[in-house]
Amino acid sequence: MYDIRRYRPGDENAIRMLFQRVFGAELTSEQWTWKYKNSLAHHALPMVATGPSGELVAHAGVLYLEGQYQGERIPFLQICDVMVAQEARGQLGNKNLFTRLVRKLFEQLYAQFPNAFNYGFPGRRPFLLGGYARAYGLVEHARETALQALRPNPWLRVERSVLVSSDLDRLWQRFRKHFALCLRRDQAYVHWRYAEHPTIDYHRVRFLIWGRIVGWAVLHTKAERTEVVDLFCHPRRLRQLLSALAYWLNIEKYPPAFVLLSDRWRQTIAGESQETELITASATWKFSFPTDEVRQSLFYTMGDVDIF
C-alpha cells in the first residue's frame, strides 16, 4: 500500500508540508537546507513513504554529524523529523508504517556507516513506537537543571566572545580525551550549528582562569529564560564554570539559566533538575553500541537536540 524509498531532490517541499500537518509548525526552505546540508553531502539520506497516488505520507530524517568514540573519529547519525500522516497510521506489528520506515532507514544507514553511532531525542509517544519496532533503546529521560549561582573566585572570569573563533579548536584538542562518546565540538561544528542557523540568534561566552581560556558556552535568551544550549570544558570544571556563569548572568540581568546535560554530567553540577518530555535513545536495530555503554559514556547538551 505504501512505497518506502530514499529521499530524492525535490521531495523537500512535500516534506515541509507534512511537517506542518503533523507538528503544526512551519519548516522553512532555509531551515531545511541548513539542517540537512551535511547529511545530503554525505549521502545520509532521509527515508520517505508515499501513498497509492504518490503523495508523501511519512518521513524519517537523519543528520550526519561528526563525533568521536574512544578518541576515534566516527559519524554521529541523529534521527529526527520522524512523522507519519494521520491517515497512514494504525496498522500493527511489521505492517505499521512507522516501524517499516525506521527499520528501512536504519538498514540503509548501517550499510553505509557500519561504525556510526545512531541516536536521537524523541518524545514519549515516538519513543514507545520505536520501542515496539525494536529500533530504540532507552538511554535516559533527559533532565533540565535550573542553574544555581555562586560567586566565582576572583581569578575566574566570564566574558562575552565572538561565536566562532580558533580557540574552539584548541579547547577541543585539549579536552576531547575526557569525553568517550560525544559530538566533535570544534570550530566547524559551532559554525554550522550556531553561526549558520537561519532563525535563532545565539551568542557565546568564554571562561578564563588567570587569563587563559578554559571553556565556553553557547546561550540563547528568551523572554523568561536563558538556555545554555552548548558548552565545553574539562569535566572537573563543569560545576565551577556553570555556577560562575549563572552568577554572571544574574549580574548582567539575564533571565534564569537552564542547562540540559546527560545524567552522568548533570549529577556533578549545582541546581535543581526536572524531567523533560525528551527521551535520549540509541539505535538498537542493526547498530551495535550497547545501551548501557551509551548511558555511561554519552555526553550531550541542548545543542544535540534539533529543537533548541
Image: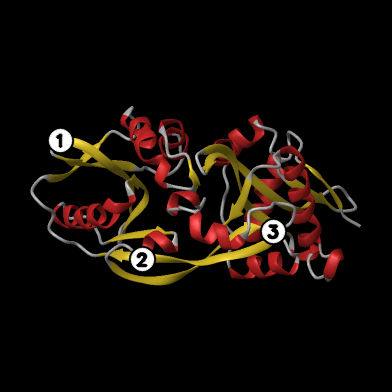
User: Upstream in the sequence, badge 1 or badge 3?
Assistant: 1
State how the image is colored.
secondary structure
Image coordinates for residue 218, horizontal then vertical, percent:
34, 45
For image coordinates 63% across by 58% down, the residue present is 290
Q: Residues within 10 Å of mark 3 (few under 14, many from 20)?
A: many
Please name the residue that numbered disc 2 is placed on. 267
Mark 2–mark 3 CB contact (< 8 Å): no
Kindly tell me whether residue 104 is visible in this rendering. Answer: yes
Residue sitting nearer the eye, 64 or 2: 64
Hey, what amino acid is under mark 1? Gly
Residue sitting nearer the eye, 18 or 264: 264
Q: How crowded is mark 1: few (under 14 residues within 10 Å), some or many (20 or more)?
A: few
Residue sitting nearer the eye, 23 or 115: 115
* Distance between the alpha carbons at the discs numbered 2 and 3: 26 Å
User: Secondary structure under badge 2?
Assistant: loop
For image coordinates 47% across by 34% down, the residue present is 192
Image coordinates for residue 253, horizontal then vertical, percent:
17, 55
Hey, what amino acid is under mark 3? Thr
User: Secondary structure under badge 1?
Assistant: loop
Which quadrant would residue 271 be assigned to in this image?
bottom left
User: Upstream in the sequence, badge 2 or badge 3?
Assistant: 2
Image coordinates for residue 76, horizontal then vertical, percent:
58, 43
Please name the residue that numbered disc 1 is placed on. 211
Image coordinates for residue 191, horizontal then vertical, percent:
43, 33
User: Secondary structure under badge 3?
Assistant: loop
User: Upstream in the sequence, badge 2 or badge 1?
Assistant: 1
Seen in the picture, residue 112 relative to 306 is either above or below; the reply is: above
Residue 284 is marked as 3
